[in-house]
Amino acid sequence: MNIGWDIRTRVLIVALVPTIVLGILLTTSLTFSRLSDQEDAMRMQGQALARQLGSAAEFGLISDNREQLQRLATSALTSSDLQGVSIFDRKGGLLAVAGMQAHSTNMLTGDSSIQMLSNQMLRISEPVRATSPVKSTGKQKMQASNALLGQIVVLVSQEQLEQLKWRQVATALGTLIIVLCGSVILSFYMSATVSKPIWRIAQAMTDIGRGKLDTRVPVEGRGSLRNLAEGINEMAARLAVVRDDMAQRIDAATSQLRERTEDAERANLAKSRFLAAASHDLRQPMHALGLFIADLARKQHSAESRLLIDRIAASAEAMENLLDSLLDISKLDAGVVTANPRPFALAPLFERIETDYGPSARERGLRLRVRPTQLWVHSDPLLFERILMNLVSNALRYTLKGTVFVVARKRGDHVLIEVLDSGVGIPQEEQAAIFQEFVQLANPARDRSKGLGLGLAIVRRLADLLYHPITLRSEPGRGSIFGVMLPRAPEENQQTQPVLLDTEQEFVGKIVAVIDDDTLAQESLVGLLRAWGCFVVAADGPDKLMLSLAEVEVEPDILVSDYRLPGHRNGLDVIAELRHRFGPGLPALLLSGDTGPETLRSATDQGIPLLHKPVRPAKLRAALAHLLGRQGTPEA
């Protein structure tokens, strides 16, 4: 049992308990010994008195002189303790009595006896024997020496003995109390002399532990406590020196780190500006190249020319994939991508996975098995679809033969969606690295057909954004199992959304206004739109566009504008001006080579859809079809 006694209490207990126990034991022992001695002395005194009376009564008993015996008994009562004297003959007959009368004892034994009566009286009987042969006066008969003549019985009061006992007990208790008081005073004094220095040392250690290194312990006494106090003071002084030295080092390191951080921030800002400018300047020609290739592919060509166009398109697509992946990474790192989780069914997503990736799997001699499911989950459907597509694409890319499975399993209140492949597998020590950018374990030659090494990096960032744990189990040569854990949602009634037809016939006769200050980008976009059957009015600025529209006397059905334009106005300002001129319902699409988060936030705040260059023709066609399809609806 742990009792929270302080050191002073413990010192007092150690000092007092043995003293109290020893004092009680000694006082009790001495008192009882003293009382026993006094009781024995009283008995011996009464017995001696009885013997003296017996010697004096010897002649009276021989001569049967009762008068003499009576005087002898009466004279014996002068003692304060003696309460009665009785003299009996050898037959037990009472010859003389003084004071309280006592009965004779058994005369046959002729022995002395001491008996305690109920009235606190001590009864002492003593036989009287002849000390020498004598003649009896009556019949002149000779009596032998030591013959029994009679018996003396005295009654001794123990009242004085009882009073003496109580005085002895009171004296013993008083002595014990005095000794205990002295012990307590001495213990408190000794406790103070021992516990106070220790308490000061403990308090000083507490203050030092809280950082008060200027605390010092008074050096008192001698011996161990003095050495301990001096040691603590020396320790505190050294700690203060070390703390001051450490504070100076920390200040110097902090200052140096601040300078390096500022240098790194300046370098990072310069790098960001350079990358933003380089990205914009690179995306502009890539955007034009993609549109030119799409326009060129629509025309009739020979087989050799068609093969060359396909190879050019594949190279351009690889570059566009790289730029799109880098854009996705930068968006996720910049925090401009926000999740909009809601309940949705997995069945349509699994059907799209099988439809989109089934043909490519069969072309590679692989089998894609998507197990049907009726489960519902809670997540952002668009972002999660990107996660699952990247995992399936990665599995197909690194599987040389066999099967890729996509399954969904219940796990309590969650759903575990796994992508299993029979590919090359991933060593344990490399599994954490594959989620980094541009890491491809089985592609040291950087073969573009095996991807760019950004798919799993995007998966990790999207999973962190959605708070979906990613699991990986893999062994080299035995394939891999990637898993994503999502919250399970209750099934809801699905409402079929109207599908917008994405055909080029929708654009025939549509008037499209185009603003782009880059000549190649403008020409490629105008050529592609005209190939789709649109009537296009293009210019490099809003003023020229207004003049061109006035010349042909038409109003645009939709406006496509670049974000960065000459002068102080950008694409959002131009869209606002043209909506003020042609009505607030004018559909508008913003194109930009800027991948910074500011551009995306500005467009999102104003409700303008933004496509980053290079824009694939299919994506551009879908965006235009969506905007034109909303025209005239209540939402527009």
Image (cartoon, grey):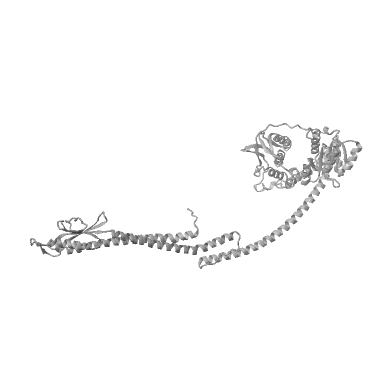
Task: Give left or right: position of 144 versus 280.
Answer: left
Residue 485, position in %: x, y?
A: 65, 40
Which quadrant of the figure has residue 549?
A: top right
User: Is residue 52 in view?
Assistant: yes
Which quadrant of the figure has residue 55?
A: bottom left
* Residue in the image at 7% along x and 60% along y: 139
Which quadrant of the figure has residue 256?
A: bottom right
Q: Residue furthest bottom?
A: 222
* Residue in the image at 11% along x and 64% along y: 134
Up-down relation of residue 230 to residue 475 (above or below): below
Of residue 412 and residue 358, the one placed in the foreground of this image is: 412
Of residue 492 and residue 605, the one placed in the foreground of this image is: 605
Residue 582, position in %: x, y?
A: 85, 37
Of residue 535 and residue 183, the one placed in the foreground of this image is: 183
* Residue in the image at 73% along x and 58% along y: 259
Of residue 503 and residue 356, the one placed in the foreground of this image is: 503
Residue 257, position in %: x, y?
A: 71, 58
Residue 223, position in %: x, y?
A: 50, 67
